[in-house]
Image: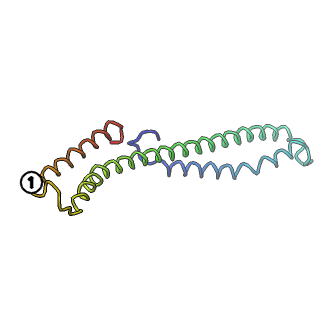
Amino acid sequence: MFDPAAADVTEAIYKLKREVLEFRAAEDPLVPVLQEIVRGRMAMFGPTREYFRDVLDHLLRVDGQVEAHNELLTSALTAHVALLGNQQNNDMRKISSWAAIIVAVPTAIAGIYGMNFVHMPELRWLYGYPLAVAVMAVVMGLVYYRLRKSGWL
C-alpha cells in the first residue's frame, strides 16, 4: 500500500471491508441471544448452559477480532487516501511550476512588447528581439533552477 509504484489498492480494501461488515452482520445478532441463554432466562437450554457460555466466550472473542479488523481496514483506507492526496499535491506543484516557467515568464515579457510603445529602444536595434528572447530564456532558466532547488520539480 505504501509503495508508490504499486497498483491502486482502494478497491481491495473496500472488498475486505465489505466482507468484514457482512461477517459482522451475521455474528452480531447472536450475542444477545446467547447472553439470554447463558443468564438462564430460557429454561429449555438449562442443561447446555455451560456449553453456550463457552460458545458466547468464543463469539465475543470473534466479535472483538472482527471489530479490530474493521478498524484496521478503516485506518488503511484513511492512510491510502492521505497518500493519494499527497501524490496529487506533488503533481499539482509540478504542473504549477511548469506553467510558471512555460507560460508566465514569456507572457509577462510579451505583454510589455504588445503594448506598442513608440519609444522602445530595441525597435530600431537589430538585436532587440533576439535579446528579448534571450532574456526570456534566462529568466525561465532561473525560475526552473529555483523551483528545482526548492523541490517543486
Tell me the kind of residue under disc 1. Answer: Trp
Quadrant in the picture for residue 126? bottom left
Task: Residue at 21% x, 59% y: name it.
Answer: 113
Task: Residue at 88% x, 46% y: name it.
Answer: 45
From the viewer's perspective, tell me whether residue 73 is left or right of residue 140: right
Q: Tell me where residue 56 appears, x and y as whole percent.
A: 78, 41
From the viewer's perspective, tell me whether residue 102 is left or right of residue 90: left
Q: Tell me where residue 130 appears, x and y as whole percent.
A: 12, 51
Q: Nearer the viewer, residue 50 or 118?
A: 118
From the viewer's perspective, tell me whether residue 27 is left or right of residue 102: right
Q: Tell me where residue 54 appears, x and y as whole percent.
A: 79, 37
- The color scheme shown is rainbow
Q: Nearer the viewer, residue 99 or 129?
A: 129
Q: Nearer the viewer, residue 70 or 151?
A: 151
Kindly state the secondary structure of the residue where label 1 is placed: loop
Q: Residue lying farthest front?
A: 119
Locate the C terminus and report the quarter of the image it occupies.
Answer: top left
Whether 22 is drawn above or below 35: the answer is: below
Task: Residue at 47% x, 43% y: name it.
Answer: 83
Badge 1: how crowded within 10 Å, few (<14), some, or many (20+)? few
Q: Tell me where residue 152 appears, x and y as whole percent.
A: 36, 42
Whether 58 is drawn above or below 98: the answer is: above
From the viewer's perspective, tell me whether residue 44 is left or right of residue 94: right
Figure disc tally:
1
Residue that badge 1 annotates: 125
Q: Residue lying farthest left?
A: 126
